[in-house]
Image: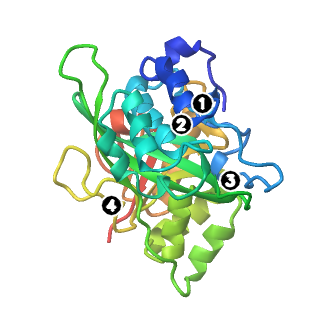
């Protein structure tokens, strides 16, 4: 993913100054990846390490320079990284509380970490992407996509992952870090006994890259057929990285009382197209516009993104706002 290089101090106004504290608490060393992912390919799509290789090295995520509110995303991501990464002797709820407190956040947030915490002796989280579930002047939802590797004793490395909806609010004073009000990890539910053909094809299609929670959503069988067929049709022309389908997304359109199309499985979001991040200013506008137009052609009634396709106007089928600055939303009716 192309990305303008920036010094850590410029791209990480919140949290980076405390990275050494977190690393010490976790018994690990954090590095910095370029614009969101450690491996050269999508972190969610990479193979888990072999037991002989051990856990991967923790790598701290950072946003693209063109993001509209990098400080808000970093606040959410640093919390998820701190909760889901620890070395030997640093596991357990109390150590997790200490890692959260080192970020200047309420230690009780550790109790909302869900699958990020386990009985493993050591763990590493890699954040693949952080997407807006909603961004307003004084509140935000950041959807943090992550993969986690854990190990107990000398046993094998186990690979998993989740998406966490982190809710934040503007600090009480100007320039204060945003506060975190809650965590909502994805809960996809159990896999279905059998799946329709379209779902099986999506899971097998290498041009569609799915994070852990989105893959589990499809295996659960609760994703609308229009969503599955749209993904498959788009994959004929594009390689793309899905960020969220059903679980891990706010129930309502953020800041409103209108139900979102995501929880009932009638929408999907895409954060990268042909290995170009939607949020990156270097990604050709024509590529994003073409993807949005092609999504409408697959039957979507509601396609949002960082731009309005040429000749388009606000309103269905196209829309654009700050929340969709970093991804393309593709929604379907019931």
Marks 3 and 1, how far apart in space?
A: 21 Å
Which residue is denoted by mark 1 in the rendering? 283
Q: Which residue is mark 3?
A: 45
State the SS at label 1. Answer: loop
Few, some or many residues within 10 Å of mark 3 (<14, 14–19, 20+): some
Image coordinates of residue 41 in percent, x first then y, are 72, 43
> Can residue 306 be seen from the camera position used here?
no
In the rendered image, residue 213, in percent from the top left (x then y), is placed at 50, 60
Q: How many marks?
A: 4
Question: Where 182 sits versus 3, above or below?
Answer: below
Q: Earlier in the sequence, mark 2 or mark 1?
A: 2
Depth order, front residue of 314/131: 131
For label 2, the SS is: loop
In this image, 77 relative to 315: left or right?
right
Image vertical order of residue 302 relative to residue 135, above or below: below
Give the CA distance from mark 4 to mark 3.
26 Å
Sequence-earlier tag: 1 or 4 = 4
**Contact? badges 2 and 1 (CB < 8 Å):** yes
Q: Secondary structure at mark 3?
A: helix
Along the line of sight, the residue nearer the viewer: 268 or 92: 92
First along the sequence among labels 2 and 4 = 4
Residue designated by label 4? 261
Whole-Å distance between the Cαs marked 3 and 2? 18 Å
* Residue 203 position (above or below residue 109): below
How far apart marks 1 and 4 lie (CA) works out to 27 Å
Quadrant housing residue 333: bottom left
Label 4 element class = loop
Q: Decide if residue 215 is in sight here.
A: yes
């Amino acid at each position: 993913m192309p990305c303008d290089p920036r010094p850590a101090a410029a791209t990480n106004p919140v949290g980076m100054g405390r990275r050494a504290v977190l690393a010490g608490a976790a018994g690990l060393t954090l590095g910095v990846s370029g614009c969101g992912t450690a491996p050269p390919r999508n972190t969610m799509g990479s193979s888990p390490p072999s037991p002989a290789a051990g856990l991967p090295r923790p790598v701290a995520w950072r946003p693209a320079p063109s993001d509209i509110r990098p400080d808000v995303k970093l606040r959410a991501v640093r919390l998820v990284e701190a909760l889901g990464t620890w070395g030997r002797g640093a596991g357990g709820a109390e150590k997790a509380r200490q890692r959260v407190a080192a970020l200047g956040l309420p230690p009780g947030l550790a109790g909302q970490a869900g699958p990020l915490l386990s009985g493993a002796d050591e763990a590493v989280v890699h954040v693949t992407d952080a997407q807006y579930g909603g961004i307003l002047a004084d509140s935000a939802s950041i959807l943090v996509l992550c993969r986690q590797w854990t190990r107990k004793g000398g046993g094998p490395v186990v690979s998993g992952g989740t998406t966490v909806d982190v809710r934040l609010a503007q600090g009480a004073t100007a320039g204060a870090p945003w506060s975190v009000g809650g965590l909502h990890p994805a809960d996809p539910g159990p896999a279905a006994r059998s799946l329709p053909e379209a779902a099986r094809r999506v899971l097998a299609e290498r041009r569609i890259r799915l994070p852990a929670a989105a893959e589990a959503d499809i295996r659960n069988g609760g994703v609308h057929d229009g969503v599955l067929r749209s993904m498959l049709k788009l994959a004929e022309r594009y390689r793309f990285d899905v960020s969220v389908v059903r679980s891990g997304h706010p129930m309502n359109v953020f800041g409103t009382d209108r139900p979102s199309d995501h929880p009932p499985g009638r929408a999907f979001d895409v954060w990268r197209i042909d290995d170009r991040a939607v949020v990156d200013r270097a990604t050709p506008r024509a590529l994003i516009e073409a993807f949005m137009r092609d999504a409408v052609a697959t039957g979507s009634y509601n396609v949002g993104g960082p731009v309005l396709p040429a000749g388009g106007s606000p309103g269905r089928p196209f829309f654009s706002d700050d929340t969709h600055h970093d991804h393309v939303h593709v929604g379907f009716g019931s």
